[in-house]
Image: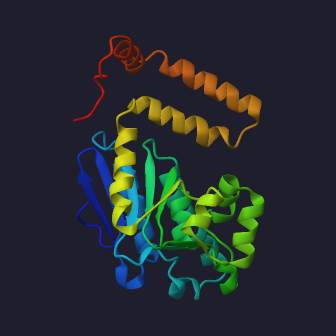
Amino acid sequence: MTDLQNVLVEREGHLAVVTVNRPSKLNALDNETITELDTAFTALDGDAGVAAIIVTGAGEKAFVAGADITVLAKQGVLDGTANSRHGQRMMSRLENCSKPVLAAINGFALGGGLELALACDVRFASNNAKLGLPEVSLGIIPGYGGTQRLARLCGSGAALQLILTGDPVTADEAMRIGLVNGVFEPAELLVKVKAIAQRMVSRGPTALALAKQAVRRGAAMSMDDALALEADLFGMISSTAEMKEGMAAFLEKRKPSWLRG
């Protein structure tokens, strides 16, 4: 993926770190960057050597400070809809990745930046981070999935307060409302997130993928349908060599063979 201009993809063993790399623009998401992220996430999802993905931003100030306002300021009805769908497709690509995806929020995560973090499976923030959806202060609404994912994650009350005021919250407040999973010192953020990712990588790879499916797909179903989905996936993995190896390793008090070096 050497042709990417605004996105860096670095490999550390079985981890891939995807960095939005526009620090002079506080890593704002323009159309090119969204397309490059889509390309990167598609490639990493299909790469058998990648077991987990970390998403972060370049520099010390911002994860992603929002969408590119110079683009949004010129849009009308048709291109506004097209811009929204473009961003939504990339976010859905990330959300539906078969591998664990962790956000390391190193500073401002506003607008499209928070929406990018919301599409990840889990989110961790530096203690100087600010998170919010300020779109209404610009006379627009979140358009990359923020109105839907934030409400599903934190509840409609917390989501509507953030969306209707446009006010950002601190990392500690984001943790209180369930928006992030943990808060770390800036210098420790990426190290801590990599350690958590490595814990996930040590688990059964098929189990990780199916567990994500159960949670992601089940959230949009009735409880009865979601439980049926869980049972089907539970049965599916029970036929795998991975399940047999995991059980055997436990009973024999050894490490399972799927552990990656």
Relative image position of residue 149 (x, y in whole percent)? 64, 57
Query: Please, is residue 142 above or below residue 18 in the view?
Result: below
Q: Is residue 187 left or right of residue 183?
A: left
Q: Nearer the viewer, residue 137 or 124?
A: 124
Relative image position of residue 207 (x, y in whole percent)? 46, 29
Image point (24%, 51%), residue name: 12
**Quadrant position of the N terminus in the picture:** bottom left
Q: Nearer the viewer, residue 15 or 106?
A: 106
Q: Is residue 169 left or right of residue 190?
A: right
Image point (47%, 73%), residue name: 128
Report which quarter residue 160 is drawn in: bottom right
Relative image position of residue 87 (x, y in whole percent)? 54, 66
Image point (66%, 38%), residue name: 218
Q: Nearer the viewer, residue 195 or 142?
A: 195
Query: Please, is residue 167 above or below residue 250 in the view?
Result: below
Image point (42%, 80%), residue name: 26
| Numbered marks: total | 0
**Quadrant position of the C terminus in the picture:** top left
Q: Is residue 29 left or right of residue 199?
A: right
Relative image position of residue 92 (x, y in whole percent)? 54, 54
The reply to whether residue 120 is in sight is: no
The reply to whether residue 157 is in sight is: yes
Q: Is residue 41 left or right of residue 129?
A: left
Report which quarter residue 161 is drawn in: bottom right
Q: Nearer the viewer, residue 192 or 118?
A: 192
Query: Please, is residue 226 above or below residue 9 in the view?
Result: above
Query: Please, is residue 13 above or below residue 225 in the view?
Result: below
